[in-house]
Amino acid sequence: MRLKYCLIIFCVIACNNSKNDINYILTNDTSKYWDVLQLPGFYQKDSSKVYPFYCYYFDKNGKRIFYQYIKGKRIQYSSGDIVIPEIWKPLTDTTILLGNTVCKIDKLIKDTFIYSNKFGQVILTSADK
């Protein structure tokens, strides 16, 4: 019985650490910008050069802002009448909520974040260099 309690406590701590790791990598413990290098429908697949047009900003309080690059400057994206929810939240160690969409985390390391959603795979790289 004691072994079961120890195992449950270990699992809870491990799950919390995974979420904390996701938070730390995405925000660097404060906030962090991530360039969107591949977004389904925005790039030609045969192009050998990829330049970011968009950027995500994540902060440790769960705020996510969508930016676009205009003439090399990062400008907050204006979507007109379309509302883009400015939230993000790790749900498990393999899923994350981005706006209203639950996404599968394919890879998340210090400078690369790859996730999949119903539209396809999205690749981001750290813009904070």
Image (cartoon, rainbow, N blue to C red):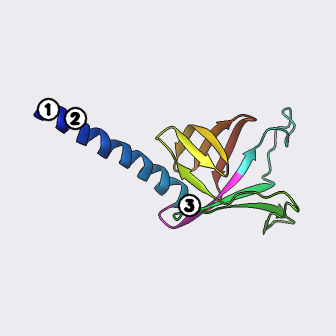
Note whether 4 is above or below 87 in the view shown: above
Dot 2: few (<14), some (14–19), or many (≥20) neighbours within 10 Å? few
The x and y percentages for residue 27 are 53, 60
Neighbourhood count class around disc 3 (C-alpha, 10 Å): few under 14, some 14–19, many 20 upward: some
Residue 34 colored magenta?
Answer: yes
Per the image, the residue denoted by label 3 is 62
User: For the stretch drawn in magenta, what is the main secondary structure?
Assistant: strand
Callout 2 touching callout 1 (CB < 8 Å) = yes
Kind of residue indicated by mark 3 = Gly
Left or right: residue 58 versus residue 121 is left
As helix, strand or loop, the secondary structure at mark 1 comes to: helix
Counting from the top left corner in percent of width and height, residue 95 is at 54, 40
Residue 107, position in %: x, y? 56, 38
27 over 14 or under it: above or below: below
Is disc 1 in contact with disc 3, using a CB cutoff of under 8 Å?
no
Q: Is residue 38 left or right of residue 107?
A: right
The amino acid type of the residue labelled 2 equals Leu
Task: In the rendered structure, find residue 3 and report the number of the disc placed on it.
Answer: 1
Residue 129 is at least partly visible in this image: no
SS at mark 3? loop
Does label 1 or label 3 sit earlier along the sequence?
A: 1
Q: Quadrant of residue 2?
A: top left
Q: Give the range drawn in magenta.
A: 28-35
Q: Name the residue under label 2.
A: 7
Foreground pick, 79 / 100: 100
Residue at horizontal 87 percent and vertical 60 percent from the top: 81
Q: Is residue 14 or residue 55 the one in the foreground?
A: 14
